[in-house]
Amino acid sequence: SLTSRDSWATIGSNGGTEPTNLTIRILQDITDNFSEERSLGQGAYGKVYKGVHENGEKIAVKLLHNNMQVIDDKLFKQEFTNLMMLNHENIIRLVGYCYETQHQHMEFQGKIIFGEMIYKALCFEYMHKGSLQKHLYEETQGLDWDKRYKIIKGTCEGLKYLHEGFKEPIYHLDLKPENILLDEYMMPKLADFGLSKLFGEEQTRVTQSPLGTIGYMPHEYLFKGIVSKKVDIFSLGVVMIKIITGPKGHSRSAEMPYEEFLDEVQENWRNRFQATLSSSQPLEGYCQQVNICTKIALSCMETDRHKRPTILDIIDKLNETETMIDEASSWSECMSSWMRGDLVKLEAFTKCEAIPRAKTCSEFPVMLRITGEQWRGVEEMPRAGVDVVVVVEVDWFMVRQGRMDIIKEALMIVIDKLGPNDRLSILSFEDNVPRIMKLTFMSDRGRDALKFMVNELSANHSYNIVAALQVGAEILRDGQAEEAGDSRIGCIMFVSDSSDTRIRKIRNRYNDVITKEFPAYVFGMGEQHHPEVMKYIADMTGGTCSFVDYDLNEMRDAFELFISGLTKIAATSIKITLRAHEGASISSIYSRGFYNRVSSDRRSGEIHVDNMYAGERKNFIAYLSVAGGNKEKLMTAGGRYRSFMAHQKLADTDVLVLRPGSACSPGKNTIHPQVAAELVRIGLWNGLLEIGRSAYELEELWVGIKRSEEGGGAAKETLLELGQDVAEIKREFAVSLPPPYFISWLNCHEWQRATTKGTRRVSGAFTVPGQHEDEDAKVDNRGHD
């Protein structure tokens, strides 16, 4: 047999594929006869010791229990063969083994007998940093993010090797921090995978006796004995959560709502990044990587195993985050500085500067304004990918007039304007059967395929509005499930000339069918469409309603206005929070279509906004009840917002007024012009909803608004713009029922977002800054053609 020195010298000398046969004597020598001082830990099937050679080199020796007779030669050799073939940087390497029988004497019932003692041991490379379990800490302390991400990625690569590296997958079945070992460079290596295969046939049949560790095993494995790759994926999710958030992360994720948990993890890591990252490192890129890793981990722990991602999906997502950070690191210092700033700004304006101490107010208006930071001419900022399902519902007789060709040509601009991370689907109907092109990324090949599909569009002989909205939502829902862990924005672009009013007349039947999960941006085409049907669809889904003439340039302008906003979203969600101070309470909040809530004690309130475009501005009115006295601070407004590259607080803004002891000077009591302008807009919008479609009543309404205190305080430009809108609506009331401009105007001002109302000439309200210049340049170019 080999000597201790000779045997040790052969360990690893053959490239790591042939483990060395070591005698039990050698193992006893290097482990100090398996002393407790050399113990590294104990598992269900054996104890691990540190083996130290006289030259200082180390290995880990796992001595299997001798009292487990179910380990037979055949199964031991089979598992040994499996361990021998594993060769990956993220899998612990088998460097030696011992399989030896010794005849030893022992005392039994007062007599000396001789028996066989079988020693079975596996020897692995020594991992200097021990198990991952020793390095788990919450977000605010312990390992920095780079090391945690390195462990996450290495663990995934090791699992990929087990699942995909062989003809038949190898299941770990006990993936947990104790079985992830770290070398001196914090490189993770999986250990103890498939050890249950060492035992007798009865225990390997997991349908009879599942093995593993409670807390890391999914329901279908523990209670039904179902073994698949998705068992390891579930365990991986628990491990990832604990790497990201510490030992208690799994229980935190189970106890908290999904979004709340994501928010808390993001905030904790953002605070740590802000304290530790240098100015040259992409803060938002790292925050987004944390967010995506957390979402991946949560998706791995889905109860339904079919909803869990594969290890290949997970690694693709992780690779995307690395590319994202590399790209973010290459931005100019100026751009990085801008990204670290506020992407959404919150302001507050009181109706007037002062309220006398002796005066009480029951409805004192405070205007709250949020503004999305402009993109400053940058062509392609880092942003969420956009998923658009284009639904075309055009009647067959439009083909004879050549109008279908105009729609097809105009749709090409949507394909051209989307970025490489965006996806588009085309949905149409042929004899009531949906014809679908799946969501396709905007690669050169993808664009060509979509343009071919657009050219193949044909008109239908009937309308399928409800079915189209349902199928469109299913396409988006399935597409977002495929991209689990990725922040994407989904919507439906609904192009129709429908005059079918049945959907509006029996709207209650569809209230539970048409989902608000994805907004539908509706384009009513030509004089044929029924605008109230289009507005009903937009209102039901939280989208906007435009109408467009069958003119190629006007249609292209409308589609470009829509897509240019959708691809420049500054914030995917915003929550404004209001807190009243002593002497004030919140009577009500006016936010048009946006959700708002006031607490029962009137001390707090909130407003929610989704998908705000860069450069967009939205105003809301909080009406306060103000008591007499000298309290100047009425309310504090704040909140949070989420964007593709940020999840930040809105800077707190205090709402202050002067409280003079006597009557105010005229200047202090003058209505703020911007508050006045917003109150004028609200008065016109509410008035149009209440009056009949009478040009005379509209004229009376407008005259009354202009003569009011608000009308007198608003800027002339505001009154001029709204006056032009009133004139256009009056002309419609005289010639058209129902009037499309009026319907689109209501929708535009409800969401404070630009819509197309026939032509560009009368569609300027709420247009994002920068779009005017683009449109003007386009008009100029047409003039030179």
Image (tube, rainbow, N blue to C red):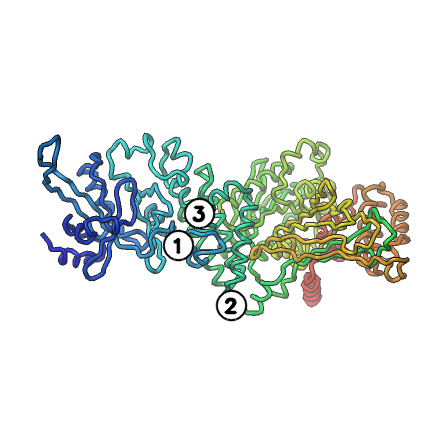
- 448 or 147, nearer to the observer: 147
Q: Name the residue under label 3.
A: 247
Residue type for callout 2: Ser
Outermost residue, front side: 110
Disc 1 and disc 3 in contact, CB within 8 angstroms: no
Mark 1 secondary-structure assignment: helix
For residue 534, above or below residue 139: above
- 502 or 388, nearer to the observer: 388
Numbered-mark total: 3
Q: Where is residue 508 in the image (x, y as percent from the top left)?
A: 69, 32
Q: Quadrant of the C terminus?
A: bottom right
Q: Where is residue 79 in the image (x, y as percent from the top left)?
A: 23, 42
Q: Is residue 255 left or right of residue 522?
A: left
Dot 1 crowding, Cα within 10 Å, few <14, some 14–19, many 20+: many
- Mark number, residue 687: none
Q: Which of marks 1 and 3 is nearer the N terminus?
A: 1
Residue type for callout 3: Pro
For residue 168, above or below residue 560: above
In whole angstroms, how far apart are the C-alphas of marks 1 and 3? 15 Å
Q: Mark 2 points at which residue?
A: 280
Outermost residue, bottom side: 333
Q: Name the residue under label 1.
A: 151
Residue type for callout 1: Ile
Mark 2 secondary-structure assignment: loop
Q: Earlier in the sequence, mark 1 or mark 2?
A: 1
